[in-house]
Image: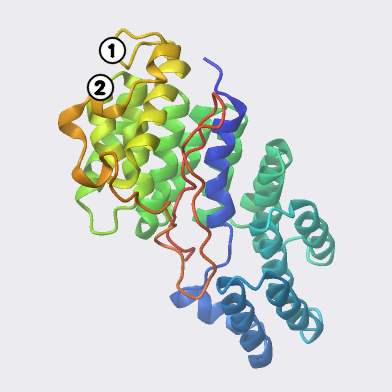
């Protein structure tokens, strides 16, 4: 069964976040060794400015960091990733292509450029580049994670899953990130039981994210277990959003997940009528609606972009953007 193009790039949204250089622990110390103190300060100011919503001001700070950096690569990578967060992917690709010509074996540049290719709809270019990166450094878990997303976009699910599992082996400390991506790959390939088996134990983890819950809800919904999908959906979504997701599961697999109603009839049926015992007080008519999801695991100093609503404006619902742990 061929997956719809939009769902593949729901998964590639993972890359947009995991590709951002959210510094942490040892990696932060390592990268700081390659840039001056002034550049580091300017990049921190750029992060804070972007987080505050001043996009033009943030871009100016990123460019100022570049102007003081000489041939340093890191500020240029950060500007390119800023452009990706602003959906200016072509500009990101131009920057990364230029600096890769200067440092053709720099795996950080290769991975950033591969992520930009995925986000621009060219996963085949990403795979070629990531294979080159792996030939240079075959111990980098994040490269295998990016390759998994690119392979999923190419519908090469078995190979994608191998790539995620390699990432897990190389860096078990980022198990939540890689298992979240692996679970979506299972869902895309129709292996719903495998996704459920992978995700269920994560629900009890303190670092569980809305993405984990909604991936599990999707696996249940695609399998036809609407009641379980709804229970999970209502933990993070409004009643209307959870209802739209159930309709999506119905349309995608051509199965009747909303009782025996025809989709056009189901579209006017509320979730309260379908599952009255599952709707909490805050989701009943007249109650205050929850805010849209926000990625909960982004580094505090970096910008947090509100999630897109899952309420469909057509027959193509948009699921929340995955909220991933920072790169290590």
Residue closest to the far bottom: 37
Where residue 67 is drawn, which disc sits there? Answer: none
Closest to the observer, 135 or 116: 116
Q: Which element carries disc 2, helix, strand or loop?
A: helix
Q: Which residue is mark 1?
A: 259
Q: Secondary structure at mark 1?
A: loop
Is there a contact, CB below 8 Å, between mark 1 and mark 2? yes
Q: Which residue is mark 2?
A: 274
Q: Position of residue 323 (x, y in %)?
A: 44, 54
| Point 77% across, 60% down: residue | 96
Label 1 or label 2, whichever lies nearer to me, is: 2
From the top left corner, tell me how far across and down residue 261 is, in percent: 34, 9
Between 104 and 275, which is closer to the camera in this rendering?
Answer: 275
Residue 199 shows in the view: no
Seen in the image, is 262 located left or right of residue 196?
Answer: right
**Taking 150 as reference, is 324 above or below it?**
below
Judging depth in this view, the residue of 252 and 193 nearest the camera is 252
Measuring from the top left, give residue 108's x and y in whole percent: 65, 63
Residue 243 in the image, given as x and y percentages of width and height: 36, 30
Q: Is residue 83 above or below residue 222?
A: below
Residue extending farthest left: 277
In this rendering, position of residue 63 left or right of residue 250: right
Left or right for 214, reference 53: left
Among all residues in the image, which is located at the extreme front? 286
Residue 319, relative to residue 193: is it above or below? Answer: below
Separation (CA) of disc 1 from disc 2: 8 Å
Seen in the image, is 302 located left or right of residue 255? right
The mark nearer the N terminus, 1 or 2, is 1
């Amino acid at each position: 069964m061929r997956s719809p193009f939009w769902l593949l790039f729901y998964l590639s949204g993972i890359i947009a976040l995991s590709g951002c250089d959210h510094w942490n622990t040892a990696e932060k110390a390592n990268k700081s060794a390659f840039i001056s103190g002034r550049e580091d300060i300017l990049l921190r100011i750029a992060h804070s400015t972007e987080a505050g919503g001043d996009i033009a001001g943030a871009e100016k700070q990123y460019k100022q960091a570049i102007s003081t950096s000489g041939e340093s690569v890191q500020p240029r990578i950060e500007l390119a990733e800023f452009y990706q967060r602003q959906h200016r992917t072509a500009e990101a690709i131009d920057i990364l292509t230029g600096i890769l010509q200067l440092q053709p074996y720099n795996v950080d540049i290769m991975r950033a450029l591969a992520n930009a290719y995925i986000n621009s709809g060219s996963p085949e270019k990403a795979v070629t580049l990531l294979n080159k990166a792996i030939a240079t450094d075959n111990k980098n878990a994040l490269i295998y994670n990016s390759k998994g997303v690119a392979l999923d976009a190419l519908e090469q699910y078995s190979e994608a899953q191998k790539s995620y599992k390699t990432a897990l082996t190389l860096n078990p400390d980022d198990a939540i990130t890689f298992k979240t991506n692996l679970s979506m790959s299972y869902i895309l390939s129709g292996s719903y039981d495998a996704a459920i088996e992978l995700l269920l134990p994560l629900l009890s983890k303190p670092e569980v994210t809305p993405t984990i819950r909604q991936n599990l809800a999707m696996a249940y919904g695609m399998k036809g277990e609407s009641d379980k999908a709804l229970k999970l959906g209502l933990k993070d979504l409004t009643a209307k959003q959870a209802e739209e997701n159930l309709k999506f599961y119905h349309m995608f697999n051509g199965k009747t997940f909303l009782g025996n109603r025809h989709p056009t009839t189901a579209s006017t049926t509320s979730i309260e009528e379908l599952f009255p015992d599952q709707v909490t007080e805050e989701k009943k008519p007249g109650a205050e609606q929850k805010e849209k999801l926000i990625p909960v695991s982004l580094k505090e100093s970096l910008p947090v972009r509100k999630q897109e609503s899952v309420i469909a404006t057509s027959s193509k619902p948009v699921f929340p953007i995955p909220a991933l742990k920072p790169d290590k």
